[in-house]
Image (cartoon, grey):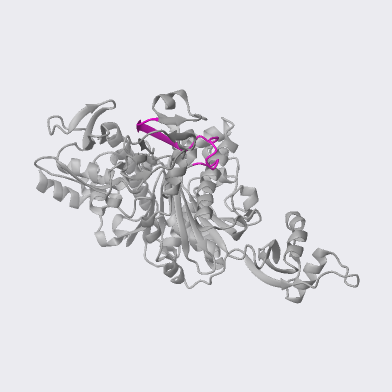
Amino acid sequence: MELRLTSGEIIELNKGENIFSALKREGIYLVASCGGKGTCGKCKVKVISGDCDVISFGKLTAEERESNLVLACRTVPKSDLLVEIPKESRLVVGDKIAIAKTKDLVGYFKSYNAALSPIVKRVYLELPPPSINDNIGDLERLKRALEEKGFNNIRFSHDFVSKMVEVLRFSNWKVELTYVESDLVPYEAIFLTSTEFCSRRYGIAVDIGTTTVVVYLVNLIKGEIIDVGSTYNSQMRHGDDVITRIVHATEGGGLEELREAVVDDINTIVNSMKERHKIETCEIDSATVAGNTTMSHLFWGLNPGTIREDPYIPTLNRFPLWKGGTAKLSINRQAPVYTVPCVASYVGGDIVAGVLASKMHRNSEVALFMDIGTNGEIALGNNEWIMTAACSAGPCFEGSGVRCGMRATPGAIEAVRIDPVTFEPEIRVIGEGHPMGICGSGMIDAISEMFLTGVINQKGKFVSGTTDRIRHGEDGPEFVFYVDEKLHRSIVLTEVDIENLLRAKAAVYAGITTLLGEVGFTIDSIEKVYIAGGFGNYINVERAIMLGMLPDMPREKFAFIGNSSLTGAYLCLLSEDLRKEAEEIASKMTYMELSVSRNFMDEYMSALFLPHTDMGQFPTVAALMGGAR
């Protein structure tokens, strides 16, 4: 029997094998925080054709069952089966494209001239076994050995001492002590390990985005990235944006539910990596987490309610060095977890990490940093000053809230061209495989192409009679980019999609112009633009300018730095110097609250058109449109 996926893969099935196991055997991972036991309800797949034995439906709703959704771990094929994996069910681990993009990060780390100094350090100890004549307690014996090596006033937690006895005897009194240094005490003992067990050293760098969660598995000895994993943030089922989730956490009593959702996502990725590389839990001895202020609060189970209430003050901006056990991560429970500091309610550790990754804080030139995701965060400044602001762009550029939207992963339409005569679209797909949806860069291309060819007007409305590719769908008018005859499925952009995307781009551009106005600068003052975000590696500058999302500037001034939040988290994982640098960046930043700015609303309303109501701000677009019409 064969298991066929709508994305093109074909898998030979073993007798009695469930879908989850078959996919996993071929390196296709699904989100399953329960490990495939049928209790979490996350490994959903849609059966298109074929016969199967559904052992149980678990937490699937009646509506989901009627849509032919089943749990992969509870479903055994009885014949050849064709299934579709929903984008929110797919866990991307070991993605060759993603891993290839990380190969230069060790060299990039070295360019900072920072010492390789992970959060945790280790010291080898050989202790004399206890005897009648040397009958001090185990902890006193350990302290004595440490003092001989110059470690004084070291702090020992209850959790450390409770596990110490077994490790010392199992290791025949030859151990490695893992410890951290902090501002509060000279040293803190974290855990003991045998030199023959848990001897390898790994860490994880985590970017908790509103829409996605991405994890690096890092070799802490060499600084190399061993694996990359990503998935949708399961908190999305409680709302696409941070405000909705804050309301659910505070008014809906869902704080712990939201915390468990994102921790389960991280653990699903980490557990898959541990299994792939045969890594023991105790060998992952440190972690760094970067996220916006709300995501950081929810990860630690902190009440985020005051973030959305005037005067918009979070519980904290600087996070203590809490432990893996406290975070409920699938790593050494005593492993320290460093959280990149936040600046304000809507500028978090993801932006601090991003600025660190861009190096704009080290240079004298005035630079603009943009992280285009669910929230559009902006930083403007140089090595002397940095102003920051945040605007709600919505999750559409990351695929959510758009009918056929998806992340910039294999199967996503990343580029679009439309023939000005026939209106036939030409598409390019990430990974060159079967198109499954359209990502942010593809959406930008599509809208700018439709505008350039006259398919839509300056307000983003379809021009009737232009082409028969415009049809009336269930959500109103839509443009068809791709039709899959076999699956009876089309990839489209609806007029509602376009309206949402115009709102998002308007918020981003209005944030830029408002921030510039606050410091008395103009677009011409900017010498460099750093663009971060999940689709930054695929975006076309000319098309984004035509859309009115990016300022109309010389193209050589733009630099795309991908997931800078994760890069910054990786840098902080490896170096004490860079962790201190991140703290300094956060201290230097001045935050501007756009929600109370009248200028921002004026700028926003003007930016709701293609590319803008003031075409003088987009001279190259005006010239191009003059030639096209």
Determine whether, in the image, residue 462 is placed left or right of residue 502.
left
Closer-to-camera residue (531/177):
177
- Residue beneath the point at 31% across and 37% down: 404
41 drawn magenta: yes
- In the rendered image, residue 626, in percent from the top left (x then y), is placed at 11, 46
Picture layout, residue 300 above or below residue 480:
below
| Residue 157 visible in this rendered orientation of the protein | no
Q: Quadrant of residue 96?
A: bottom left
Closer-to-camera residue (565/101):
101
| Residue 319 visible in this rendered orientation of the protein | yes
- In the rendered image, residue 120, in percent from the top left (x then y), is placed at 62, 64
Closer-to-camera residue (531/260):
260
Picture layout, residue 258 above or below residue 580:
above
Q: Which residues are magenta?
A: 32-51
Task: For the N terminus, give its image quadrant.
Answer: top left
- Identify the residue at the far front of this view: 15
568 drawn magenta: no
- In the rendered image, residue 10, in percent from the top left (x then y), is placed at 34, 44
- Residue beneath the point at 61% across and 47% down: 328
Task: For the C terminus, give its image quadrant.
Answer: top left
Picture layout, residue 530 above or below residue 406:
below
- Identify the residue at the far right of this view: 132
Determine whether, in the image, residue 497 is placed left or right of residue 391.
left
- In the rendered image, residue 515, in percent from the top left (x then y), is placed at 38, 50
